[in-house]
Amino acid sequence: MQHAGKVAVSDSLTVPFVDYSAFYKTDANTYRQVLDEVCSRGDFILRSDLEQLERNIAAIQDCRYGAGVGNATDGLMLALKAAGIGTGDEVLFCSHTFVATAGAIVAAGATPIPVDIDDNALLSIESAQEFLTPATRAIVPTHLNGRVCDMRGILDFAQKHELIVIEDAAQAIGAKYYGQGAGSFGQASMVSFFPAKVLGCFGDGGIVLTNDETIYETVRMLRDHGRSRNGDIVCWGYNSRLDNIQAAVLNTKLDKLSDAIDRRREIASIYSQQLSDLDELGLPPSPVATGPYYDVFQNYELRAQQRDKLRDFLWKQGIGTHIQWGGKAVHQFEKLGFSQHLPAVEKFFEQCLLLPMHPYLADDDVLLVCDMIRKYYRT
Ligand SMILES: *Cc1c(COP(=O)(O)O)cnc(C)c1O
């Protein structure tokens, strides 16, 4: 995910890890009509399709307001700034995330402080506790792979230490925790529409979600050169608007969002059924109909013994897999200058592997992946 250039996209593979052109081709005629209709209206920037999308996404995620932005990284930076985070502030984040989470904190002028993972491979509150200082002002939990963090625990922790909570829900559209939408728990959140995300557009795109009217109005100004609703410039701003045409494409895709999520959950169930007896693997929790977590499986990330050898073996069988972010947690990129040691997430990155996961996979493809994994460990 997110490494379009490095991901194993190969026509020669039987089961490629990701098939970007399928995202377009499956409904190409619809998209051509949308392009023609919207462009014929001349509706390019901050137009009605965007407003409609903002209402739609906010409703899906149980939030009052949505503000479309150029990408989710900008969205997180703008949400942090709108919440008053900036120079001198320390912001806790989980190191099992894309570097964008930390990059946005830096772009907001604050200092990112990486913390370790819990048993769910998501932000560990215990670890966050260890890294608290008098300068800690906010916490950014990432709902990675489409599973919501332990938000009850995180909200308690944040309240106790007077921290602002901004959720990285980039991968979590449709995900729920105790029936409530990802991104609706803290002061604000953002979702990404990067093409390979659960709801992807045809380029970059994102949205900031919030229940806080002031944060919403501030993000709207910041994304549009600091312009207020009456056109007056009231602060320094940015240019980070979600293109109206991307919003129109996304509105069209929303009709199929719940089917796409159902399919991801079905695929995850097959992986669970077929692989759960292999002691060499650590699987993510299977999708269940009841209980606190409703996962959308942006990714299917497991832990595997002899991970690199397994990956090579699968490649030779024509199956593409992916090691998220080159096999490093954010704090492990040396040039970024972190000095923390986070044993659980470092261990995790020695073993983690993403299996193919997208709505256009056939059952036979998924079963083939499982057969080959079984073959690797059983011979
Ligand atoms: C994709 C992603 C982002 C960044 O989203 P963009 O829209 O590409 O800027 C941030 N955090 C996580 C966890 C992501 O997966």
Image (cartoon, rainbow, N blue to C red):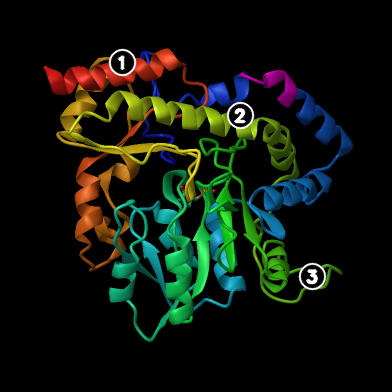
Residues rendered magenta in the picture: 26-31
Q: Which residue is label 3 attached to? A: 228
Which residue is depicted at the point 30% across and 58% down? Answer: 117
| Furthest residue in direction bottom, as rendered | 134
Q: Quadrant of the C terminus?
A: top left
Residue 94 picture location, percent across and down: 36, 60
Q: Quadrant of residue 288?
A: top left
Q: Residue at x 16, y 28 (%)?
A: 309
Query: Disc 2, disc 3: CB below 8 Å?
Result: no
- Secondary structure found at label 3: loop
Q: Is residue 187 above or below residue 306?
A: below
Q: Counting residues from the N terminus, which is met first, the one under dot 1 or under dot 3?
A: 3
- Are there few (<14), some (14-19), or many (20+) residues within 10 Å of tag 1? some
Q: Earlier in the sequence, mark 1 or mark 2?
A: 2
Tag 2's secondary structure? Answer: helix
**Left or right: 147 as drawn, with respect to 206:** left
State how far apart marks 1 and 2 are (Cα): 27 Å
Give the SS element for disc 1.
loop
Where, by quadrant of the figure, is residue 193 drawn? top right
Q: Position of residue 231 (x, y in %)?
A: 84, 68
The residue labelled by disc 2 is: 259
Check contact, mark 1 vs mark 2: CB within 8 A.
no
Q: Earlier in the sequence, mark 2 or mark 3?
A: 3
Q: Which residue is mark 1?
A: 318
Between 91 and 361, the residue placed more toward the observer is 361
